Image (tube, grey):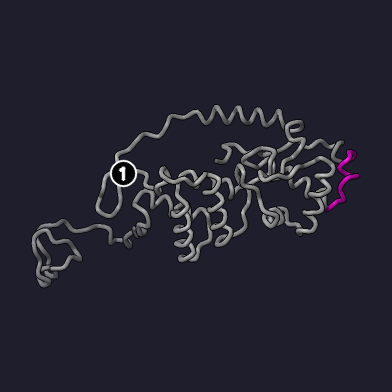
Amino acid sequence: MSPAHPLRWLKLYGPETIHGTTTKELDPSERWCWIGFLCLASMSPVPGTICVAKSLPYTTKQLCQLLDVPPTLLKRAIVKMTAADKVSVSSEGVHITNWSHYQGDYVRKQNERARVSNVTAPDAVTDVTDRGRGRGRGRGRGDRSSSSTAPDARIAELVRVYEANIGAITPLVAQELGDIADDYAAEWFEAAVREALANNVRSLKYIKAILERWSRDGFKAPLRRKPASGAGVQPARGLPNAQELEKGWTPGAQEGDSP
């Protein structure tokens, strides 16, 4: 869902910025909203349109958090920028009107590089086998193939869960959530967030590690703790020791089994 290579910089013409119409159209605090909008548009999964994902715009509250401005300033700036034909607002998000004119050449080159780097062989199909505890060789990440949930709706659900439990959404977090939505069901993400909170950790990296563990070991599989130092070597099975004989050892019994 997210672009492989979001723009790391954008074109900003010095003379036009200082002496152009922007200085007359916007007051100093509103100009920061304009510069902030340009930055967000460069980091967006839809270049030139400020949004979490395609057809999923940021809310006013989210934009205020990203730019660290009060709602009154943001709304006033948007009204002035719209009147000056700098931006347009729709259900898709906030679109920078002149984006293709000022940023077009760089965006085109970035897209060409992204297309080249994204030409990779498809993942090999693996055989899923039952190992008794819901584990297998496949990449069990929730059943999304039969779901009618649109990709944008899945991302929106992940954003909702993240904001409600972890923190404010940012373009980088939105990009990672888009990648997670491609690989995992929303139910998996919500369950991983609950496990992270139970361990008093609010980190997307930690949540992703939980999802990767579940993908490997099975949904909600417990963490396999490393043995304490010196306790990792198990004695070879065969003749019982004195403690096992006292418990009533039987051939093939494992340590901790009932007699």
Work out whether residue 40 can be spotted.
no
| Position in image of residue 99 (x %, y %) | 74, 35
User: Crowding at label 1, few (<14), some or many (≥20) Cα neighbours within 10 Å?
Assistant: some
Circle 1 sits on which residue? 137
| Position in image of residue 213 (x %, y %) | 39, 52
Q: Which residues are magenta?
A: 19-29
Which residue extends farthest front?
148
| Residue 128 position by quadrant | top left
Query: Label 1 sits on what residue type?
Result: Arg
| Position in image of residue 197 (x %, y %) | 49, 64
Q: Residue at x 17, y 61 (%)?
A: 254
Please, is residue 99 above or below residue 24 in the view? above
Is 117 left, or right, of 250 in this rendering? right
Q: Tell me the quarter of the image containing the N terminus.
A: top right
Q: Residue at x 12, y 65 (%)?
A: 241
Which residue extends farthest bottom?
246
Work out whether residue 99 can be spotted.
yes
